[in-house]
Amino acid sequence: MNRILVSRQLRARAPQTALSWFTSLNISRSIHGVPFATVEVEEISGSQPAEVLNLVQGKWKNTNRWNTILDPLNGEPFIRVCEVDETGIQPFVESLSKCPKHGLHNPFKAPERYLMLGDISAKAGHMLSLPKVSDFFTRLIQRVAPKSYHQASGEVYVTQKFLENFSSDQVRFLARSFGVPGNHLGQQSHGFRWPYGPVAIITPFNFPLEIPVLQLMGALYMGNKPVLKVDSKVSIVMEQMMRLLHYCGLPTEDVDFINSDGQAMNKLLLEGNPRMTLFTGSSRVADKLAGDLKGRVKLEDAGFDWKILGPDVHEEDYVAWVCDQDAYACSGQKCSAQSMLFIHENWSKTSLLSKMKDLAERRNLEDLTIGPVLTFTTEAMLEHKNKLLQIPGSKVLFGGEPLTNHSIPPVYGAIEPTAIFVPLEEILKDKNYELVTREIFGPFQIVTDYKNDQLPLVLDALERMHAHLTAAVVSNDPLFLQEVIGNTVNGTTYAGLRARTTGAPQNHWFGPAGDPRGAGIGTPEAIKLVWSCHREIIYDVGPLPKQWKTPPST
Ligand SMILES: N[C@@H](CCC=O)C(=O)O
């Protein structure tokens, strides 16, 4: 009933142009089915594998090279991804080269595309708000990047809200320019946001929908033509989302979608010469790309994200719960996951650690509140634990054992939510620092404590880190907050009693700081910074002063 009411209201309010889309959308299908989808989420299995295609120059294409993806929960070969190898990149190179440096649109060219993309975003946001569609993507995400329903649907929700944010005129407002009066009559300078033209986007496995959609749409909004590559393990989600975007009116030629290994992609980047490449993923690959592409990159790379509990102790249950979510939701596979926790001595009188242990032990495979780790094997994580335990004074606070009673294939990892205590003085020793601050992309965190007069040591530990993505300063003491914030750099830092490291929504900047190559995601500022550059047009149209004569040379 409600949905019918909503659709009636939407019809009543929709302006004429949008009305045709709402009318053409088969309302009953949009409620009872998923009209753009080519897969049935629950049916994907070893006996009925799903197939993922590539999109180039407006056409969905397959190749004869299939990469078989194993179901992370039972090891069945359940998805076949059609991958382009080094010999197959030519159509993608050609497609990129069709887009000039000044882009598909800019403030002086095809401005109606800003409006078109606003309309597409409105429609796509509306589609994701339909329970059937949101449930479709949530369950599809769960199949390939196992996380709880709540976590997966959060990703869909952030994507929906982002699309809604950039509906209607909001895309053209991104390209807002400014003017400054000149020195004489007829002169004025104007600053514009200019596209890069052909661009590339490479995104990881952990947020199969949120990261690629937010970056892809940002790239399009500013006038670029992107080629998008998502980690093949999860690219089925974005393949389906591309179909949704086409359904909502995105011209099929506007984005190319490629599945390939790193080598073929590298070749495409070198030959296709995108003017900018956005990479989200490991620091190792990020640094290689920065070199190969001569710096024409923006990066959201690793984060060894930290949280400091300050001297003021309150809301112990809440703080314990946020620690548990930050360290172990999505099995710790968020770039924002809490990797290190510094606890002020005042918390030692509380039962914070035992509460964190209880919360960690509630997690289970059944509802995917803990699940497979896609980039570290169980052995690799246990080996890391054992190395840490050789440091004097270190100990397992909880976890540290492999998960049991499961059929997660051995190529993936499966361990309990784990916390290892390492004394602060030991962390700071040169021989230990690198080991302790190694990012384990799994349910694994380091815990330490500090005395009131040891804050400078904590700040020293933070200064020595090499990636500065998220951070949390859990305190309502303004002087403490000032001290920590003033002496650190993390790009997305939460401050206050409710501070967290994860769960960045679409309404605030998310990205690293302290690196000129750092990218952002989500907000208008992030989109403008990553996906456009500044261009200044200085109008100088005269007239010349009446008595003007050629002056002496200078
Ligand atoms: N919303 C996610 C970040 C997405 C990454 O770019 C988080 O907060 O972990």
Image: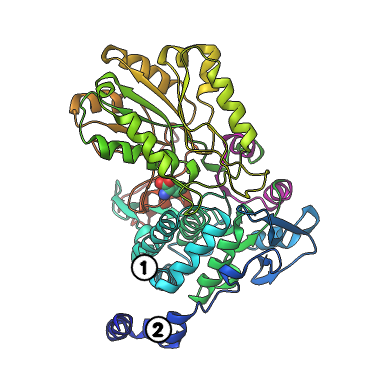
For label 2, the crowd category at 10 Å Cα-Cα, with few meaning under 14, some 14 to 19 and many 20 or more, is some
Q: Main secondary structure of the magenta part?
A: helix
- Which one is in front, 29 or 488? 29
Does any atom of ligand 1 lie closer than 8 Å to the CB of label 2?
Answer: no
Q: Quadrant of residue 307?
A: top left
- On screen, 174 above or below 391? below
Residue 495 vs 85, above or below: the answer is: above
Q: How is the image coloured?
A: rainbow
252 and 32: which one is in front?
A: 32
Query: What stretch of residues is rendered in magenta?
Result: 263-289
Element carrying mark 2: helix
Task: Provide the secondary structure element on which disc 1 rests.
Answer: loop
Q: Position of residue 492 (x, y in %)?
A: 37, 39
Residue shown at 56% from the left, 68% from the top: 41
Residue 437 position within the rendered picture, expressed as x and y whole percent measured from the top left:
50, 25
Which quadrant holds residue 19? Answer: bottom left
The front one of 72 and 227 is: 72
Residue 531 within the magenta-colored segment of the rendering:
no
Residue 61 percent location from the top left of the image: 71, 69
Q: Residue 547 location, x and y as percent?
A: 31, 50
Which quadrant does the N terminus fall into? bottom left
Q: Who is closer to the viewer here, 196 or 434?
A: 434
Residue tagged by mark 2?
Answer: 22
Taking the magenta stretch, the answer to whether it contains residue 278 is: yes
Q: Is residue 536 visible in this depiction of the protein?
A: no
For label 1, the residue is 167
Q: CA distance from mark 1 to mark 2?
A: 15 Å
The image shows residue 15, relative to residue 152, as above or below, that is: below
